[in-house]
Each structure stands twice: as C-alpha cells, then as structure tokens.
Amino acid sequence: MRQLLLALLTLTFIACGGKSGNGSDAGNTGGDDGGGDGNNGNVDAPALVPPGCTAPDLTKPQCSNCIDDDGDGFADSFDIECTGPTDNDESSFSTGIPGDNIDAVKQDCFFDGNSGGGDDGCDIHVCCLLGAATVADCPIGQNQYDPANCPPPIGTTPLSQLCIDTCGALTPPGCDCFGCCTLCDPNNPSMCYDVITNPATSPDCTADVLADPTKCHTCTQVPSCGNPECGGTTCILCPGQTQTDLPAECNGTTTCPSGVTSCAGGAACPANTACDAGSQCCVGIIL
C-alpha cells in the first residue's frame, strides 16, 4: 500500500476559489501560524477548544472530550484528524473505533464508524478515488478494478440513493462520503490538499505531512456524495481553516453547504446532529 505509484499521486497546484485543490491557496488567510506548531505538543497558545466546552470530560471519546489529546493546539472538532464526535483518536485519521475503515480496496462510507457498505449502500474501489482512468493506472487491487464502475468523474456508475442520503448526512464540509477531503495545513491554512484520510489507504498520513503525496495520497473527490465544496468565495471553511481565513468577499461570515444548518455564534443544531466547530456547521452523528 505504501508503494502507491508516485506518478498517480503527484500534487497538482490549482486555485481553490470555491473548489478544492492540492497545494492551493484556499482564500485570503489571516496569518500563517494557525494557532499551533504541529502535532509535537509545542504550541504557541492555549489549545483552540469548541465553544461548548466548559470542562474536560474523560468519559467521552477523544474528539468530543474538550481536551487537546495530541497536544497540537486544536481540540475535538477543531482538530482536522477528528472525523466526528465518536472518533476516539485525535492524533491520527484513524477513528480508534474497532473494525472501522480496515479495507484498503473497498471503500464504504468513511464517517459511519464501521467497515462495509451493508448498512450505508456505499461501495466503490479505492482507485476511483485515486483517479485511475484505466486498470493499468490502478496501483492497488488492480484485479478488482473496472473504471466504468466508478461514480463520476472517473466512471459512469451512479452511487445508490441510500449511500448519498445516509453517508451524506454524516460527512463534514470539505469531504466526500469516502474520506477524500480538502485539508488545509493548520499552520499555513492557505495551503490545502485533496487527500485520502482512510488509514487503510494512507496509513502514514497526519496533519504534519499533508503536502507529502507518498504519505497523504492525493485523491479525486466524488462530488455526488457528501459536502466536498469548501474554500475561497464559497465562504465554507475547509478542515484546518478558521474564520480569520475567509476571503474579504465573505465579510467575516461563514456559510454551510446547501441543506446543512449553521451553528455559527452558538446556534443550536437539529436533532441527531452536532456542531462541527471547525466549519461552524451541523453534521450528522452516528446513532
């Protein structure tokens, strides 16, 4: 898996004005320090903690316990390595949930807390995300790959409505249903990368090495499922960005993807959702 073809994964520098991209400027930034010095515990200021936190709660998973567990300066949903409130590993893109995201080839809903598409209707080959236009381009599980079976933009096979509805509700802004996310370097949030966050596919990917395609493998998002759009004049914050990173056109105001409720300013979220402090949007939770 770690030998994925570098030619396929070479970073492409494109503008991110309303659409994700690798190594891109995702809008006007308010500074390059991002509030911390990376995942080494040497931070310049107290950790950025979600507004609802009043005290640490050791009974909850790491990504909802109001603690900066990995010492990178970002706690819970401000930490780009947190996939949701049930994620119990703040130090990596692994969720810490037994049996979750263990298949490197078959990709189901990345955000539902388990592996296998039986409950969510999501099932695509990883090479659909790696941008493999032909079987020969597929670096992993090649004998199981048919590009035509991919959803657009690689293939022509649509995703099931069950996948779109079930997984889409659990997917935070900046990501598609399969964990291909536009992640911005927390220490330089103008630099954003489309990377696969599934630890079975990118086992060495962390917030510190987003720019390294040999560790954080470059991916092609599936626009029909999830909320992949972020950055630029969309005024939707990508993971790793804060309100100070919005371009002037947004007038300091964040927005959320269509159909997603905003929790900016402490607004309450609907039932079965929780406020993602990073994006200031309400995201579905695993029930």
Image (spheres, rainbow, N blue to C red):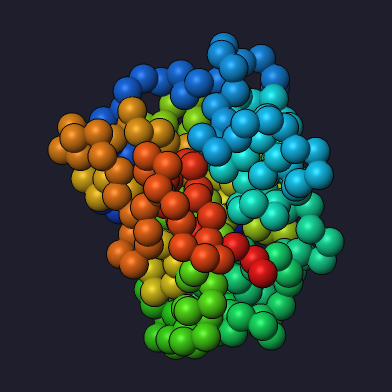
Q: Quadrant of residue 285?
A: bottom right
Point out residue 218 in the picture as x, y percentages from the top left corner: 51, 52
Give me the residue at 37% from left, 39% from top: 265
Residue 79 lies, with reference to residue 152, above or below; the image says: above
Q: Is residue 229 visible?
A: no
In this view, the residue farthest toward the left is 249
Give me the residue at 35% from left, 33% from top: 243
Give me the residue at 33% from left, 28% from top: 244
Q: Quadrant of residue 251?
A: top left
Q: In front here: 242 or 39?
A: 242
Image check: 160 left or right of 70?
Answer: left
Point out residue 170 in the picture as x, y percentages from the top left corner: 54, 65
In this view, the residue farthest toward the right is 98
Q: How many numbered circles does the render carry?
A: 0
Image check: 275 left or right of 238?
Answer: right
Q: Is residue 54 visible?
A: yes
In this view, the residue farthest toward the top is 44
Image check: 176 left or right of 251?
Answer: right
Point out residue 144 in the picture as x, y percentages from the top left corner: 66, 82
Which quarter of the rendered picture does the C terminus lie within? bottom right
Q: In front here: 124 or 176?
A: 176
Residue 86 lies, with reference to residue 207, above or below; the image says: below
Residue 201 lies, with reference to residue 191, above or below; the image says: below
Point out residue 88 in the picture as x, y percentages from the top left corner: 75, 48
Give me the residue at 68% from left, 30% from top: 55
Which quarter of the rendered picture does the N terminus lie within? bottom right
Q: In front here: 127 or 199?
A: 199
Residue 173 lies, with reference to residue 278, above or below; the image says: below
Image check: 110 left or right of 1?
Answer: left
